[in-house]
Each structure stands twice: as C-alpha cells, then as structure tokens.
Image (tube, rainbow, N blue to C red):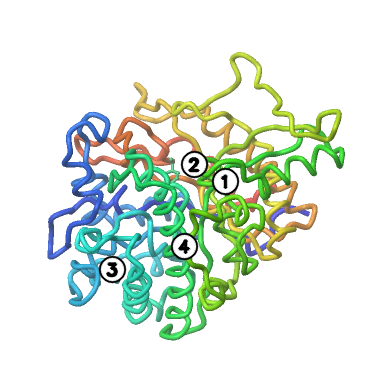
Amino acid sequence: MGFKRDFIWGAATASYQVEGAAYEEGKGLNIWDVFCEQKGKVFGGHTGEVACDQYHRYAEDVQLMKQMGLKAYRFSINWARILPDGVGEINPAGIAYYNHLIDELLANGIEPYITLYHWDLPYALHKKGGWLNEECVEWFGEYAKVIAEHFSDRVKFYFTFNEPQCFIALGYCGDVHAPGLQYGYREYFQICHNVLKSHGKAVLVLRKYAKQPVQIGFAPTGAFYFPETNKSEDIEVARKATFEEFDTVEGSMWHVAWLSDPIMLGHYPEEGLKKFAKYLPKITKEDMELIYQPLDFYGQNIYNAVKVRAGKEGELEIVKRYDGFPKTAIDWPVTPECLYWLPKFFYERYQKPIYITENGMSSTDWISLDGKVHDYHRIDFYHRYLKELKQAASEGVDIAGYFAWSLMDNFEWAKGYSERFGMIFVDYNTQERTIKDSGYWYKEVIEYNGENL
Ligand code: NOJ
C-alpha cells in the first residue's frame, strides 16, 4: 500500500507571488500593490510588480512543469485582474490571461486547480471596508460567478480561500501583511465570520454556474501538534491541542478548528464560543447553513508542528526541541511527523479525502559553478515528509493529492525575495529559470507514484 494510483502530484503558487504585470492591461490595484508602496513594510522595499513575470512567461513555466512531470498546478486568480474594481466591469485581458494559462496546462496534460483568494483583495473593495464589510459575501459571490462562467468549462477543481488564518491575523490584526491594519478582537471575529460566509456563498455560486460538475474545498493553515509516542494519552493531548484549546484570542487566530469546524461540521468550536462570547458578532442559523456547504475534499497547508506528550495528570506537555534542532532558512523547524499525524487527525474529524495543499521549505539556494542548483536539503526535507504522508496513506487515510510549495522561487510576502521556496530557481535579474535538483528528484517520485520513497 502507499499512494493511490490516481494520486495527484502537483506544485502550487499564488497570483501576487508570481504573476507580476501589476499595472498592465487593465488590471486593478489590489491591497498588496498598495502595501508594498509603503516604506518599511516589505524586506528591502521589494514588490510584486514584476515577481516571476509569469503573466508573460506562463508558457515557458508550463513547459518546466511538464519537464518535472507534474500532474497538477495549483494557482490563484488575481481578483483585480479580472474585476478591476472587485465587482462590476470585467477586464477581458485578465480573463484572456487565465484562459491561456488554463489551455496551456491542459494541452500539456496538467490539471489546473484554482484558488479563488490567495490574499490579493482588490483595493477598490478595501476602500469600502474589505472583509470587515458584510457586503463582502456578495462581492465574493459575484467574483466566484465570473470564475465559474469563464473557466469552469475546463477547470474542475477549486479552493475558495488560502490560509484565511494568515491573512486575517497578519493583515488585519498584526500589520505584517496587507492591508497592514491592527484591528481589535471584535473586528477580528467579524472578519472571520464574513470570510466563512463568503466561502459558503462562493461554493453555492460555483456549483450553480459551473458548466460541469466541479469539486470544491478550501486550504487553511493552523497551529498543529503531534504526539511524542503512539500512546493513546499522548495522541489525545495532541488532538486536543490541535482542535480544542482556546485560551486566548491571539491563539485562536492560528487555530485550525475555528474556521474549519464551521465549514466542515457546521458549527464553531463550543469552547471558543463560550470563551469569546463578548467579542463575537451576531451568528444566525442562516449564517451557519450558508457556511456549511457540502465540500468534496479537505485541503490543508502543513509545514511543521509541535511535539507534545501527556503529563502525569494527562495535561499537555510540550516536548522541548533540542539545541541545534533542524530548521529551514526561514527558521521553521523540520518536523516530518506532522505529515503522518495531521492528515490522520483531519481525516478522523472531517471524513473527507485530503489534499496537502502546501508543504515545502525555504533554502539558501544559488546556482553552482556547474550551472545547476544542488538543493540537497530540500530533497531530504521532501523525502522525510512524503514518507510520513505515505505511511498515513498506507494506514487508510484517504489522501487525494499533494502540492509542493512552491513550483518556483517567488515573492515571499513581507520577506520579499529573500526566501527561496521553489523547486525551480528564479534569477530575478534575468528571469531565467533553472529546475533545481529537487525538481528532478520530485519528477522521479511522481513517476514511481512514491513507491521509491
Ligand atoms: C503559506 C502561503 O499560502 C504561501 O503564500 C507562502 O508563500 C508559503 N506558505 C510560505 O510561507
């Protein structure tokens, strides 16, 4: 046993991180265009104005994907590229761009997976209050309709939101990401609720206007825990920490269950509802029905997790990482076990096929004297993580696919171009691309469907 025969091996990117062409062919402004203009917000004053220039180089990029043997490409639509004001008039050049990209992918045997929202809200909607304005549900619905009408004849797979935890916490409560706000608790919970309703609305609209049956999910992140041993007490503590502990609002911002339970189970976690009651917006039965749309799969971005055990009284104990613990260039710990335990936990809780929608690492890559990129650490990272995922699959967890983050080096948000997550190296001076050793390694894994791991 291992991965299913039709397992989807893919790689992911996001519009603002790779497209560039920020001011071209009728695209409207989005909150990241504007955030990057402000001094001191992004490392080195970098912006996504050019990024990887995928807007002009998509055909070349699809050829690289083909060379890597990818079965699927997960990319996001830049909302203001197709609807410059967020709603209303459509930009034909924006639609044409995604049509070309989709056609090119399909012509090369690569399945497109569309993410509707990977953080680049049209600036025109931001000026109207953005995600804090309850009208966002209608705006997102209109956007989803445009996507369904123009792309669903060819695109079967959709994710509504990417990592809502991240853009809400860092963008609206932390001034680290666009739009750079520092809202309080009430606004935080209101935005969560609005985003959840927008998700539900988009699912309804996509299904209603799609030109063929489509499959829909979303791609959250979270703070994850895994047990030190196989003992049931340790497992219970890890599961509880992942899904049930709501001590502070700040903690809840990274809590996967706060957003995933309403979408997958139809209700917010009880403990959080009690604890945060005084900050919560009005939550109606109709709201919860809208949010709880049947989904086809459960997507999850996972990079690392915290190892825990049960203490003497069954309480949560964090297992301290030893000095010199392995970490990636961005300082994230290397904890491959998370790709065994978390898919298990999610499958038990939400009972849907699982896609790992992002996983990967940043490394200090450069082009060697021989013209190649020898990213041995990244190969080792993927190898360890994928072995764990394979084990989960072998034990019966229904895992539908895996998307490496990222297809190519790109604009890493507030860290600009200082972090390289790609399997393809991008020289930002020349836009020259070089498939890294990890990209060739991944090709073999795909060929063997993971049997060689
Ligand atoms: C999460 C985000 O979805 C993606 O945009 C980001 O680049 C990676 N993880 C790495 O931080």
Q: CA distance from mark 3 to mark 2?
A: 26 Å
Which residue corresponds to mark 3?
Answer: 100
Query: From the image, which quarter does the C terminus lie in?
Result: top right
Tag 4: Cα neighbours inside 10 Å, few (<14), some, or many (≥20)? some
Marks 2 and 1 in Cβ contact (< 8 Å): yes
Considering only vertical position in the picture, is 137 above or below 393? below
Nearest to the observer: residue 231 or residue 15: 231
Which residue corresponds to mark 2?
Answer: 440
Question: What SS does tag 2 mark?
Answer: helix
Which residue corresponds to mark 4?
Answer: 281
Considering only vertical position in the picture, is 137 above or below 311? below
Q: CA distance from mark 1 to mark 4?
A: 50 Å
Instruction: Please name the amino acid that badge 1 sits on.
Output: Glu
* Residue at (13, 65) in percent of width and height: 26
Q: Is residue 13 visible?
A: yes
Tag 3: Cα neighbours inside 10 Å, few (<14), some, or many (≥20)? few
Q: CA distance from mark 3 to mark 1?
A: 28 Å
